[in-house]
Image (cartoon, rainbow, N blue to C red):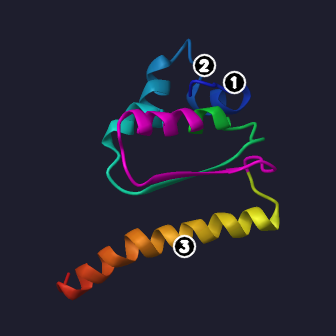
Amino acid sequence: WSSYNHEYTSNILNDPQLDPEAYTASSPIEYADKLQDALLIQHGLVDDNVLASDSIRLYQRFIELHKRNFWMSLYPMERHGFVQPDSWYDEYRRIDELFDAYVKPVRTQETAAGR
């Protein structure tokens, strides 16, 4: 929430000066050190609801923490809700690849173990 967007965010979390605890408690960067699983961040660069600078700062924090298995896909023509067919394709292709690499193997192992 470092690049606070008043119109969007204050409707959810109140004003940061009135309720700073809500901003701290809900900010992903506050929990970056706890990342254990693979993470794909996808962000439209012209998003005026959730500002891209917040996702970029979170990505930088993962670098500083020497985390592994995290990626970022930036979409230069997209806002908060994607509309470009190529962006949709790329977004879901990356999600599918992440699922195949990190979720399916775990589920297969659990099934083989009888869980």
Q: Which amino acid lies under the numbered mark 1 shown in the image of this protein?
A: His
Name which residue lies at 70% across and 33% down: 8
The image shows residue 4, relative to residue 75, as above or below, that is above
Q: CA distance from mark 3 to mark 2?
A: 37 Å
User: Which label sits in the foreground, 2 or 1?
Assistant: 1
| Residue ID for mark 3 | 96
Helix, strand or loop status at disc 1 = helix
- In the image, 64 versus 34, the foreground residue is 64
Q: Earlier in the sequence, mark 2 or mark 1?
A: 1
Name which residue lies at 56% across and 12% down: 17
Helix, strand or loop status at disc 2 = loop
Q: Are marks 2 and 1 in contact (CB under 8 Å)?
A: yes
Helix, strand or loop status at disc 3 = helix
| Residue ID for mark 1 | 6
Which residue in the rendered view is the most extreme toward the top? 17
Name which residue lies at 82% across and 61% down: 84
Q: Which amino acid lies under the numbered mark 2 shown in the image of this protein?
A: Asp
Q: Earlier in the sequence, mark 3 or mark 2?
A: 2
Q: CA distance from mark 3 to mark 1?
A: 34 Å
User: Which label sits in the foreground, 3 or 1?
Assistant: 3
| x and y percentages locating residue 105 in the rendered image | 34, 77
| x and y percentages locating residue 83 in the rendered image | 81, 59
Q: Are marks 3 and 2 in contact (CB under 8 Å)?
A: no
Residue 70 shown in magenta: yes
Task: Specify few, some or many for label 3: CA neighbours under 10 Å numbering under 14, 14-19, or 20 or more.
Answer: few
| Residue ID for mark 2 | 15
